Amino acid sequence: MTIKAVFFDQDGVLYNSMPYHAESWAWAMTKHGLPYTAMETYRNEGRTSVGVIQELHQRMYGTPASPELVEAIYKDKTAHFTEMTGGFPGIIPDVDRVLNFLHEHGIACWVVTGSGQKNLINALNGTFNNVFSGIISSFDVQKGKPDPEPYLKAWERCGFKKEECVVVENAPLGVRAAKAADLFTCAVNTGILPDSDLAAEHADKIFPDMAALLQWFETTITNNL
Ligand code: MG
């Protein structure tokens, strides 16, 4: 396969943010009467915050959550996340090596995230050596993951054929979105879910960490030079 573009998910792939997202979501939801666990956060990763809150509220109380409640939960969640991370969660080990390798080999790197956290999105190019050709965030799409729209948008904008594009994801619903967009998908299991959750969404490859992904890129790309 000839790779010309790689689409990276943000949370749990570029930033080591998932443990803090999980903890702060569980804390804020539970505080507002919606019992929620870190494990559920990992399973729901990729869904919009409002969607997750509404679903849980509907299940618990049989009614939709008010806009005020949604806002209060989101505010508390963000405050807790910022308190734990100082605003910046750090990067996934070795992902900078993956990005630098691809960039040096002329492969376009894109970010495709459901995140709407502006401080983290704005920090992407500064954090990762300006390697990104483009960023698709929640501000660019009507439907978030697991809908294929975010990945289809990146594919349309990058200008390459589908078979020349690869997705790097960590979350089951992210893999579902990428596969629904008909893209080759590498899952890197950086979280607490079993590999079988990623396999169930038909990830083409599953790696335990970024060093293993880098090795695969090195082999695949060098063989095509
Ligand atoms: Mg992710």
Image (cartoon, grey):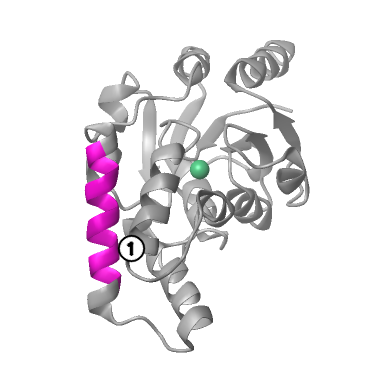
Q: Quadrant of the N terminus?
A: top right
Q: Quadrant of the C terminus?
A: top right
Image vertical order of residue 179 relative to residue 58, above or below: above
Image vertical order of residue 37 relative to residue 35, above or below: above
For the question of whether residue 8 can be seen, the reply is yes
For the question of whether residue 10 can be seen, the reply is no
In front here: 108 or 92?
Answer: 92
Is residue 36 a member of the stretch shown in magenta?
A: no
Disc 1 crowd, CA 10 A, few/some/many (<14, 14-19, 20+): few
Measuring 27% from the left and 74% from the top, which residue is drawn there?
69
In front here: 59 or 129?
Answer: 59
Q: Label 1, on which residue? A: 31
In front here: 22 or 46?
Answer: 22
Does 131 sit left or right of 143 as displayed? left
Measuring 40% from the left and 24% from the top, which residue is drawn there?
91
* Segment colored magenta: 70-83
- The quarter of the picture where residue 218 lies is top right
